[in-house]
Image (cartoon, rainbow, N blue to C red):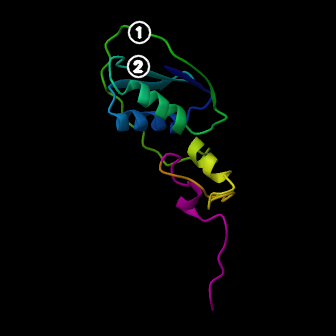
Amino acid sequence: MELHTTSSQNYLYNTVVSIVKTCDIVADISQREGKIICAFASEHENLQACLDTIAQKLPASIFLKASKSYANEEEVSSKTELKNEYPLNLGLCPSCQKEMFDVSSRRYYYPFTSCSCCGGNYSFLNTYPYERKTPL
């Protein structure tokens, strides 16, 4: 599977790697030349569930342009590691978007909606985006 992206940031790569590790799939994932290339062991029983999870959890991003999949007969070895960086807070995952725009949700239009899939809020690592008055 190839995910075409215009960003060199690692947040999409890290999201895919995390999902693949959670699903316990043997995969080789790399990011280079505007692509995130994912090679999966096609005989794995959880492969379809893993691909469905990637489709559901991948955050909405203006940097994600296209995707395609194709078969390859090469042996796949799992040598994929996360690229540890601070979360970038560039987009919400589809489940957070659904919760944020659902009128019956308690987080309806809540601006700080996020989950462990979307990542933390980078802005909160340094300062809050608002000021609280200190009681006298």
User: Residue 15: percent from the left, percent from the top?
Assistant: 48, 38
**The residue under label 2 is which amino acid type?**
Ala
Q: Please determine whether, in this image, residue 136 is positioned above or below residue 74.
A: below
CB under 8 Å between callouts 2 and 1?
yes
The magenta segment is 117-136
Name which quarter of the figure residue 50 lies in.
top left
Q: Residue furthest front?
A: 104
Looking at this view, name the residue that lies furthest to the bottom.
Answer: 136
Mark 1: amino acid = Asn
Residue under the image location 49 percent in, 11 percent down = 70
113 relative to 66, above or below: below
* Residue labelled with disc 1: 72
- Disc number for residue 39: 2
- Does the image show residue 13? no
The alpha-carbon separation of the residues under discs 2 and 1 comes to 8 Å
For marks 2 and 1 on the same chain, the one whose residue lies earlier in the sequence: 2
Residue 62 relative to residue 48: left or right? right
- Looking at the image, residue 90 sits to the left or right of residue 32; the answer is right
For the residue labelled by badge 1, is the local secondary structure a helix, a strand or a loop?
loop
Q: Main secondary structure of the magenta part?
A: loop
Q: Position of residue 2 (x, y in %)?
A: 52, 20
Q: At x 49% / y 49%, what residue is drawn?
A: 86
Viewer-nearest residue: 51 or 38: 51
Mark 2, secondary structure of its residue:
strand
Q: Is residue 108 left or right of residue 11?
A: right
Report the number of numbered marks.
2
Going 62% across and 38% down the picture, which residue do you hit?
60
Find residue 21 and report its horizontal and vertical position in percent: 35, 35
Q: Please tell me which residue lies in front, 1 or 80.
A: 1
The quarter of the picture where the C terminus appears is bottom right
Quarter of the rendering containing residue 107: bottom right
